[in-house]
Image (cartoon, rainbow, N blue to C red):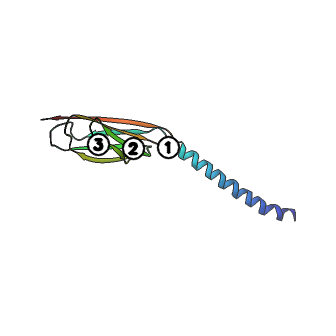
Amino acid sequence: MKNSVNKPLLIILTLLISGFLNFVLTDFIQAATGPVTVSLTANQTNINKGEKVALSWNSTNADFCVAYSNIQNWFGARSTSGNETITPTETATYFITCSNNSGFSATAQTKVFVGE
């Protein structure tokens, strides 16, 4: 009789412990995302006023990115990788900073020179 009472209890405890470990380990693995890397490139770095430039970026281990420049035409939240075409009106440096929920971040930059 003792074995029949303990068997259901043992099953319940095993399920509870298994669920708890799964929860803890999943959170630990997600929180232990490694350092972030990011690259940012322009398809051309010397243009004439009015010409378009394609900016491309790619990151690893990032959850979100923010773009900014020393002029107003590239600013705000961005996906963790992508392409965007811009038309700079003056020489500018473009930056993208990507971060993850573990506190790691990285910044990349590229400069586009605009002539007359």
| Gap in angstroms between the C-alphas marked 2 and 1 | 12 Å
Label 1 sits on residue: 101
Label 2 sits on residue: 65
Q: In this view, does 84 lie to the left or right of 24?
A: left
**Where residue 100 sits in the image (x, y, percent)?**
46, 42
**Where residue 45 sits in the image (x, y, percent)?**
21, 36
Residue at 70% in and 56% down = 16
* The quadrant where residue 50 appears: top left
Disc 2 marks which amino acid?
Answer: Cys
Q: How many labels does the image show?
A: 3
Residue in the foreground of this view, choosing between 7 and 95 = 95
Residue at 77% in and 58% down = 10
**Where residue 77 sits in the image (x, y, percent)?**
37, 46
* The quadrant where residue 86 appears: top left
Locate the C terminus and report the quarter of the image it occupies.
Answer: top left
Residue in the foreground of this view, choosing between 37 and 67 = 67
State which tag comes first along the sequence, 3 or 1: 3
Disc 1 marks which amino acid?
Answer: Asn
| Gap in angstroms between the C-alphas marked 3 and 1 | 24 Å
* The quadrant where residue 74 appears: top left
Q: Is residue 76 left or right of residue 61?
A: left
Residue at 16% in and 43% down = 51
Crowd tier of the residue under label 2, counting other residues whose Cα lies within 10 Å: few below 14, some 14–19, many 20 or above: many
Crowd tier of the residue under label 3, counting other residues whose Cα lies within 10 Å: few below 14, some 14–19, many 20 or above: many
- Which secondary structure, mark 3? loop
| Gap in angstroms between the C-alphas marked 3 and 2 | 13 Å
Disc 3 marks which amino acid?
Answer: Trp
Q: In this view, does 51 lie to the left or right of 102?
A: left
Q: Which mark is residue 74?
A: 3
